[in-house]
Amino acid sequence: MPESPGAEAPRDCALCDRLVEYRALIRAAHPGWYNGAVPSFGDPAARLLIVGLAPGVSGANRTGRPFTGDWAGDLLYPTLAKFGFSKGIFDARPDDGLELTGAMITNAVRCVPPRNKPVGAEVTRCRVFLAARIAALPRLIHIVTLGKIAHDSTVRALGERVAAHPFGHNASSRIGGYTITASYHCSRYNTNTRRLTPAMFEAVFAGVREGLGAAR
Ligand code: URA
C-alpha cells in the first residue's frame, strides 16, 4: 500500500539543524547504520497506535525500525505479542519477519536526538508528521503514548490542550474519536528504577485489548 503523503519524514529530513548535525556525526562514525528519520512500523489498518519518544542512537537509528535493537523494544515487542498485536518472532532485527497486526508504532520525533532528549522546538517541528500519521490511519481508535513528551505532543497533534489531558500512567482520556492512554516510557532507566515494571506495562495493553474488544 503506498504511504500517505506527510505521514513519514523523508529519511534525510532537514527540519532541525541540531538533529541534522548529530546525524552527520553518527553517520561518520557508523556509516553502516541506518542514520535517518525512522519511519513508523506496522499495520496500515491499525486500530492501535503506539507513540514513542525518538529513535535510540544504537537502536532504531542503527536498525531503521522503531524500538528495534535497544532495551525499550525488548520490553515493548514481547508485550505487544502477549496481547495479540503481532505475528512472528521479534529478534531485534528489521529483517526478523515480525509483523504487527492491528497496531503501528511511531515516534513523536523521527530523528535520533543527542542524549535521547529532543528539545521542545524539535518536538514541535516533528509534530506535523505525527498529526499526519494519525490522520492517515482510517481504523485508528486507541493511542498509547510512551512518556510525557510523546503524550503531550500527541494531545497537541490532535488540537487539544495538554492541561485538559494531563499525563498519568495508565490514565486515559478521549479526544475526538480516539482514546488516549498514557504510559511511562519503557526505557531501561524507568524499568531499572522500577518506575515502570513489566506488570504495569502489561496492564496498559491489557486495558487497550479489552477496549478494542468492546469496540469490535
Ligand atoms: N526507540 C524508539 O524508536 N523510540 C523510543 O522512544 C525509544 C527507543
Image: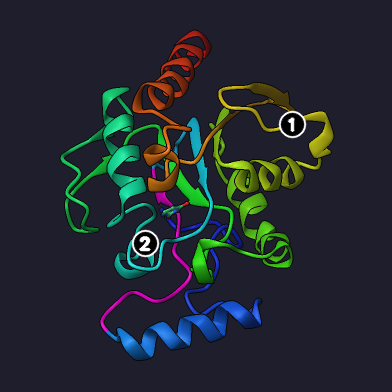
Are the residues flagged by discs 1 and 2 in contact, CB closer than 8 Å? no
Position of 67 compared to 174: left or right? left
Q: Nearer the viewer, residue 192 or 95?
A: 192
To which residue does mark 1 refer? 166
- Front one among 198 and 73: 198
* Residue 11 x/y as whole percent: 47, 74
> What element does badge 1 sit on?
loop
Q: Identify the amino acid type marked 1.
A: Pro
For image coordinates 50% across by 67% down, the residue present is 115
Residue 101 image offset from top left, x and y in percent: 33, 34
Dot label at residue 60? 2
Q: How many labels does the image show?
A: 2
User: Is residue 140 located in the magenta-colored stretch of the structure?
Assistant: no
- Up-down: is 174 above or below 145? above
Q: Where is residue 98 in the image (x, y as percent from the top left)?
A: 22, 45
Q: From the viewer's perspective, is residue 66 above or below residue 197?
A: below
CA distance separating discs 1 and 2: 28 Å
Mark 2 Cβ and ligand 1 under 8 Å apart: yes
Q: Which residue is painted at 32% across and 69% down in the image?
A: 62
Q: Does the residue labelled 1 lie within 8 Å of ligand 1?
A: no
Q: Residue at point 58% right, 27% down? A: 169
Residue 39 in the magenta stretch? The answer is yes
Give residue 117's quadrant in the image.
bottom right
* N-terminal label among 1 and 2: 2
Q: Residue at x 83, y 30 (%)?
A: 164
Would you place residue 71 above or below residue 116 in this image? above
Q: Residues within 10 Å of mark 2 (few under 14, many from 20)?
A: many
- Residue farthest to the top? 214
What segment carries the magenta color?
32-42
Drawn side of residue 167 relative to residue 75, left or right: right
Q: Which amino acid does label 2 sit on?
A: Ala
Q: Is the magenta stretch mostly helix, strand or loop?
A: loop
